[in-house]
Amino acid sequence: MLHHGAVGGAGQGRLHAGQAADARRGDDGAGHGSGPDRHRDQADCVGQRAGHQRRAVRGDRPAGEGRLRDLARPVGAGVTGGDAALTAIRAALLVHGAGGGGWEWNVWRGVFEAKGIAVAAPDLQPVAAGLAATGFDDYLQQVRDALSVMPRPRVVVGASLGGLLALHVAEAADAVVLVNPLPPAPWHSDLIVRTWPDIVPWHRQARLDGTRRALPDADEATALFAFRHWRDESGAVLRHAYAGDEIARPACPVLLVLSQVDDDVPPSIPSAMAAAWSSDVLQTVSPSHVGPLLDRHATGIAAQAVEWLNHAVQVG
């Protein structure tokens, strides 16, 4: 998703989507990799721990862990245990954002699977001709294909660019969860305009200090792991996403998960979209675009998303 933060350009007082991504990646200042081997090992351990997390979590957390706001349905049931019978949703497709990968969902995967939900979090792949030749529809077809083979009831969860992709396949889902999504038209017009090269060098121009700034509420090991896994992105995909797609409000239940601070997709943009669509909103205290997936609040936020699904999706 554009989560990878970026340094602000000349004369600009804040980060924006493309710039944020540039800042969050980055080398360690030596122009190669992520630094000492011990740091790499530490980062790998974080990825493994997050990917295999199975402990019970609660979704009815106080404001410090993210809070449920403007939910039309009551909350509370089916959150503390791992009994699959308490979870209406059988499967979840988790769609990452620009420059990222399925690894961004390691924490959410653990929470969902602990509730008996089968999870797929694939890496979006460039076409054979290369990243520069890859278009939005190439990613979209991959998402359609992945969702089509999952059992129902099923949810599609997308973050940033992944949120826009998720909206395009909402007709094939029973619920949609959008984490700081790139918005469709007309709300796209409020995003900061940027010119994207054919290949956006988020991996090649990564900076570890930029990744730390992009994840201000994450621990050092998580920042190191993220830094090592950012990737370059197709400029054509981002140009399409920022041009604004016309998408109708999905017929299925929709939850928007918003950060308290987001310099990539300012919260006012998805908030306006949620109001227009009468969608549910989970307002979190995460201080960054990618925070709901990777910072210290991620486990509680994912648990509250499951809690919402338990009430939003009816069995039978």
Image (tube, rainbow, N blue to C red):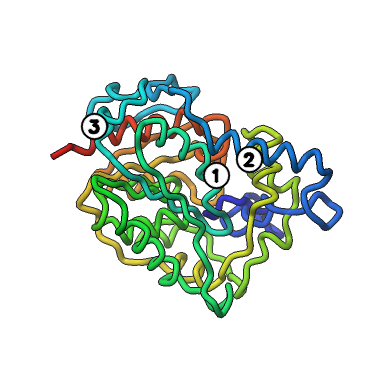
Local secondary structure at mark 3 = helix
Q: Is residue 7 visible?
A: no
Q: Name the residue that disc number 1 marks.
A: 290
- Residue annotated with mark 3: 311
Q: Secondary structure at mark 2?
A: loop
Distance from Cα at disc 1 to Cα at disc 2: 7 Å
Instruction: Give the mark, 1 or 3, whose residue is nearer the N terminus.
Output: 1
Can you say which quadrant of the picture contains the C terminus? Answer: top left
Residues packed near mark 3 inside 10 Å, few (<14), some (14 to 19) or many (20 plus): some
Q: Amino acid at mark 1?
A: Val
Residue 13 visible in rendering: yes
In the figure, 248 relative to 271: above or below? below
Q: Which amino acid does the dot numbered 2 rest on?
A: Leu
Above or below, comparing residue 191 to residue 128 in the picture:
above
Residue 272: x %, y % from top left: 35, 48
Residue 276 badge: none
The residue depicted at 27 percent of the width and 22 percent of the height is: 77
Which residue corresponds to mark 2?
215
Q: Are marks 1 and 2 in contact (CB under 8 Å)?
A: yes
Work out whether mark 3 precedes mark 2 in sequence or the reverse, and give the earlier one: 2
How packed mark 2 is, by other alpha carbons closer than 10 Å (few <14, some 14-19, many 20 or more), is: many
Q: Residues within 10 Å of mark 1 (few under 14, many from 20)?
A: many
Q: How many marks?
A: 3
Q: Nearer the viewer, residue 214 or 132?
A: 132
Q: Amino acid at mark 3?
A: His
Q: Identify which residue is drawn at 31% across, 52% down.
A: 150
Q: Position of residue 173 (x, y in %)?
A: 26, 52
Q: Residue at x 31, y 66 (%)?
A: 246
Q: Who's the residue at 24% across and 47% down the image?
A: 152
Cα separation between marks 3 and 2:
31 Å
